[in-house]
Amino acid sequence: MKTDPSDEKLERLFAAARKAELYKPSRELELETRVMAKIRATHQGQMSFLSWTWRLVPALVCVVILLGIWTYATEPHYTVDFSAVAKIGNEETMLTAYLTGE
């Protein structure tokens, strides 16, 4: 009885599969590491606009805080006269009373 040639080919494929190294999840990690290393190497020395702006944020926050302190320190401190606040919008009433003689 003669065997089919495709059976021999199939047996060789199975034998090759048995000899092959098993799948290792660490290979994916190694690939990611290599890809990221290549990306870092290509971008070495190049800084994007976004990275510059994030580096400037703390300095600009300090400037804003210092300006706020300076504004508060140089502002004249006086008390508000509440009688002046009560007279706001009262001019028309006083004019009407003067003109009508009340």
Image (spheres, rainbow, N blue to C red):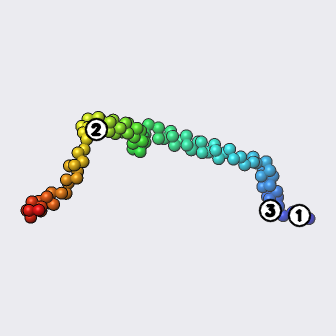
**In the rendered structure, which disc, 1 or 2, sits on the residue that comes first in sequence?**
1
- Tell me what residue is drawn at x 72 percent, y 49 percent: 23
Residue named by callout 1: 2
What amino acid is found at the position of numbered circle 3 in the picture? Ser
Q: Which sits in the foreground, 74 or 67?
A: 74
Please tell me which residue is depicted at 41% across the width and 45% down the height of the picture.
50
Name the element at disc 2: helix
Reading the image, the residue beneath label 3 is: 6
Badge 2 crowding class, 10 Å Cα cut-off, few under 14, some 14 to 19, many 20 or more, is few
17 relative to 67, above or below: below
Residue at the limit of the structure toward the right, as seen here: 1
* Residue depicted at 23% across the width and 51% down the height: 85
- The residue pinned by badge 2 equals 71
User: Badges 2 and 3: C-beta atoms under 8 Å apart?
Assistant: no
Mark 2 or 3 closer to N-term?
3
Dot in front, 1 or 2? 2
**What's the amino acid at mark 2?**
Thr
Task: Name the residue nearer the viewer: 50 or 84.
Answer: 84
Say which of marks 2 and 3 sits in front.
2
Could you tell me how far apart the alpha carbons at marks 2 and 3 are, in whole angstroms? 90 Å
Residues at marks 1 and 2 touching, judged by CB atoms closer than 8 Å: no
